[in-house]
Amino acid sequence: MQVLMAFITGLIFGLGLILSGMTDPAKVIGFLDIAGAWNPSLAFVMGGAILIASIAFHLANTRPKALLGDVMRLPTARQIDRRLVLGGLAFGVGWGLTGYCPGPAVDSLAIGGSKPLIFVVAMLAGMAIFEIHDRRSSAHKRKAV
């Protein structure tokens, strides 16, 4: 049942990305071009997403278990640290240069073309490099203790 719900949730998310125009890099870059031909439409998409997520997180905080009975696991970190800032900067630079973020890039693979494929391959490579670095860093810290 959890796999089915994950599939349905991902399908709804992907359709939402397509319908909102988030899979169009030109629209995204137009949104980020504040000093040029600014396209504010994605601000409404983000505002709607923030509103719905706020309601969902509020409701999730009132429940001990998820709808399918699994233990509720919500983020607990509250501090802004170096990793968060650098990750946010890397995400923002990648988004600004390509017009893609991870979800819309994966959606765009279905449409075809080399640009989303190159982005997704680069994204997966970056994730792998991070994992390798993080594991080595954690192992080094454990040895030092």
Image: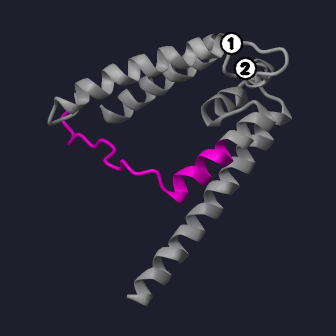
Label 2 sits on what residue type? Phe
> Most extreme residue toward the bottom, as rendered?
144
Task: Using residue 127 as the reference point, say whether residue 96 is left or right of it.
Answer: right
Q: What residue is at 74 percent from the left and 13 percent from the top?
A: 39
Q: Are marks 1 and 2 in contact (CB under 8 Å)?
A: yes
Residue 68 percent location from the top left of the image = 23, 31
Task: Using residue 114 as the reference point, say whether residue 15 is left or right of it.
Answer: left
- Secondary element under disc 1, as helix, strand or loop, is loop
Residue stretch in magenta: 68-91
Q: Residues within 10 Å of mark 1 (few under 14, many from 20)?
A: some
- Secondary element under disc 2, as helix, strand or loop, is helix
Residue 16 percent location from the top left of the image = 55, 16
The one nearer the camera, 55 or 131, is 55
Q: Quadrant where the C terminus lies? A: bottom left
**Numbered badge on residue 101:** none
Disc 1 versus disc 2: distance between alpha carbons? 6 Å
Label 1 sits on what residue type? Pro
Q: Identify the residue position indicated by label 2 in the image.
A: 31
Q: What residue is at 56 percent from the left and 22 percent from the top?
A: 14
The answer to whether residue 145 is magenta is no
Q: Is residue 51 above or below residue 74?
A: above
Q: What residue is at 85 percent from the left and 19 percent from the top?
A: 36
Mark 1 or mark 2: whose residue is earlier in sequence: 2
Q: Quadrant of residue 62?
A: top left
Task: Using residue 38 as the reference point, say whether residue 141 is left or right of it.
Answer: left
Residue 18 percent location from the top left of the image = 64, 16
Q: Identify the residue position indicated by label 1 in the image.
A: 40
Q: What residue is at 45 percent from the left and 81 percent from the top?
A: 141
Q: Quadrant where the N terminus lies? A: top left
